Image: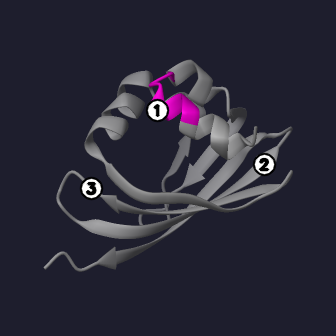
């Protein structure tokens, strides 16, 4: 099973432990909009479940995955009502997600 499939299965089952097991202990997520870096210890179980409950994700798909990288794309509607096309690029280390960056394009809602 690919890492992408493991993540999707864990999310569908709301299995936070299985989802977090896909992430390297040194994982970091760079937010280009603010320059903020989120680390694994910054992402609590509560915040993860909150995102699963409040972000509407449509058309999520794996564009490419190998031993070094996972690239995904989805349309995401955020709690404030805005909708973006979001591409996520995850570099891997030791078979786990290690570094994450995104590209996001606003989608008109009207």
- Whichever of labels 3 and 2 marks the residue nearer the N terminus, that label is 3
Question: Where is 39 relative to 17, above or below?
Answer: below
Residue that mark 1 sits on:
12
Name the residue located 46 percent from the left edge and 32 percent from the top edge. 12
Tell me: 9 left or right of 107: right
Name the residue located 83 percent from the left edge and 44 percent from the top edge. 93
Quarter of the figure with the N terminus: top right
Q: Report the span colored magenta.
A: 9-15
Name the residue located 37 percent from the left edge and 53 percent from the top edge. 57
- Whichever of labels 1 and 3 marks the residue nearer the N terminus, that label is 1
Are the residues at dot 2 and dot 1 in contact (C-beta closer than 8 Å)? no
Are the residues at dot 3 and dot 2 in contact (C-beta closer than 8 Å)? no
Q: Nearer the viewer, mark 2 or mark 1?
A: 1
Figure colour scheme:
one colour
- Whichever of labels 2 and 1 marks the residue nearer the N terminus, that label is 1
Residue that mark 3 sits on:
78
Q: Secondary structure at mark 3?
A: loop
Residue that mark 2 sits on:
92
Q: Secondary structure at mark 1?
A: helix
Residue 31, position in %: x, y? 49, 59
Tell me: 93 left or right of 32: right
Residue 14, position in %: x, y? 44, 25
Q: How many marks?
A: 3
Question: Where is 41 relative to 75, above or below?
Answer: above
The answer to whether any part of residue 29 appears in the image is: yes
How much space separates mark 2 and mark 1, taking CA atoms?
22 Å
Name the residue located 57 percent from the left edge and 50 percent from the top edge. 29
């Amino acid at each position: 099973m690919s890492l992408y499939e493991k993540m999707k299965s864990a999310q569908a089952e709301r299995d936070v432990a299985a989802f977090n097991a896909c992430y390297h202990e040194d994982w970091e997520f760079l937010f280009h909009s603010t320059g903020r870096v989120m680390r694994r210890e910054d992402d609590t179980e509560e915040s993860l479940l909150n995102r699963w409950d409040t972000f509407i994700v449509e058309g999520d798909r794996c564009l490419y995955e190998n031993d070094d990288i996972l690239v995904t794309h989805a349309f995401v509607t955020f709690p404030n009502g805005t909708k973006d096309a979001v591409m996520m690029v995850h570099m891997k280390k030791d078979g786990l997600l290690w570094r994450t960056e995104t590209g996001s394009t606003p989608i008109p809602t009207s």
